Amino acid sequence: MAYDVIVVGGGPAGLSAAQNVRARGRTVLVVSNPLEENPLWKAKQVDNYLGLPGVSGAELLTAFRRHAEDSGAEFQEGRVLSALRSGEDWYVSIGNTMAQAKAVVLAAGVARGKKFPGEAELLGRGVSYCATCDGMLYRGKRVAVLGWTPSAKKEAEFLEGIGCEAVYFDKPRDCAILGAEKVEAVRCDGVTEAVEGVFLLRPAMAPGDLFPGLAAEGGFVTVDRNMETNLPGVFAAGDCTGGPLQVSKAVGEGLIAGQKAAAFASSFLERL
Ligand SMILES: Cc1cc2nc3c(=O)[nH]c(=O)nc-3n(C[C@H](O)[C@H](O)[C@H](O)COP(=O)(O)OP(=O)(O)OC[C@H]3O[C@@H](n4cnc5c(N)ncnc54)[C@H](O)[C@@H]3O)c2cc1C
C-alpha cells in the first residue's frame, strides 16, 4: 500500500504525528505493537501532562489513539524491520509485508539494551529479527527464540508450526551468540544450546538498524528544529531524539514531525 507518510511507532510521538498529518489532509499509516505493550501503558499516574494531572498512562494512550483513529489515520500492527529509499519513495518492511510512502516519521521510542555479542557479526547468517519473515529458512532445524514482547511466544509457536524445533528464552538478561561463519549456538543466562538460528524479538530496534546511514549521537537520532534527520523525507520525534524522555515533549515533537512530513509529501506531489 502507498501512503503519503508512514509513522514508525504508536506511542505519544507517533500518534501526535499521525493526527497532524491527517490535519494537513495527507494519508498516514502508523505501524506499531498493541497499545498495551507501549511502555507508558504501565504508568499508574502521569502528573506532569498539562491539564490532566493524575491521568493514567493507559488513559492517555487510549485517548491519543482514539484521536488519531478518528482523524482517519490507518494502523497496522507489527514491527518495522527496515526502510530503504528507492527513487523518491521509502519502502518500509513490516514483518513480511511492505508499505510505501513519500515521507517517514520515526517515533520508535528508546531501544533499551545493547546488542549482544555475536549479534551484529552473525546478522543474516543465523541471526534474525522476524520469525514470520525468515522462519522458512530454518524449517527442520533447531532454533532459539529470545523474546522480550508478549507476542514473542506466538512467534516461537509459529516456528514450531512450520517444522522448526524452537527453544524459547523469556526475557534473557545475558546472552551471547556463538559461531564463526554462521550461528552454531546461543548462550542465554548461563545455558548453552546448539542452534542454527537465533530470533531476537525485542519491542524496539535501534534507529540505525532500521534506516542505514541515519545520523545519531549517543544512541539518539540527530534532528534539526523541523525534526528533520539527515535522510531525505525522514523525520523523527519523541524519546528516540533524546531527553527529556517525557510525554509532553514527545507530543510536541510529533506535531512538528507530522506537519513537516505532510509538507514534504505535498511538495513532492506538487513537483510531479
Ligand atoms: C513506567 C513509566 C512511567 C512514565 N511516567 C511518565 C510521566 O509521568 N510523565 C511523562 O511525561 N513521561 C513518563 N514516562 C515516559 C513516557 O512514557 C515517554 O517519554 C513517552 O512514552 C515517549 O513517547 P514516544 O512516542 O517517543 O515513545 P514510546 O512511547 O516508547 O512509543 C514508541 C512505540 O514504538 C514502538 N516501536 C519501536 N520500534 C518499532 C518498530 N521497529 N516498529 C514498530 N513499532 C516500534 C515501541 O514498541 C513503542 O510502542 C514514563 C515511562 C514509563 C515506562
Image (spheres, rainbow, N blue to C red):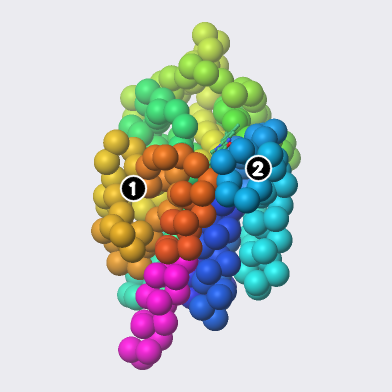
The stretch of residues the image draws in magenta is: 258-272
Q: Secondary structure at mark 1?
A: strand
Of badges 1 and 2, the one in the foreground is 2
Q: Position of residue 143 (x, y in %)?
A: 57, 29
Asked if ligand 1 lies within 8 A of label 2, the reply is no
**Location of residue 268 by image quarter:** bottom left
Can you see residue 171? yes
The amino acid sitting under disc 1 is: Val
Q: Residues within 10 Å of mark 2 (few under 14, many from 20)?
A: few
Q: Which sits in the foreground, 148 or 183?
A: 148
The quarter in which the C terminus is drawn is bottom left
- The residue indicated by pointer 1 is 221
**What residue do we see at 66% from left, 48% from top?**
52
97 to the left or right of 81: right
Q: Position of residue 240 (x, y in %)?
A: 42, 45
**What residue do we see at 67% from left, 64% from top?**
67
- The residue indicated by pointer 2 is 53
Q: Secondary structure at mark 2?
A: loop
Can you see residue 162? no
Q: Which sits in the foreground, 82 or 205?
A: 205
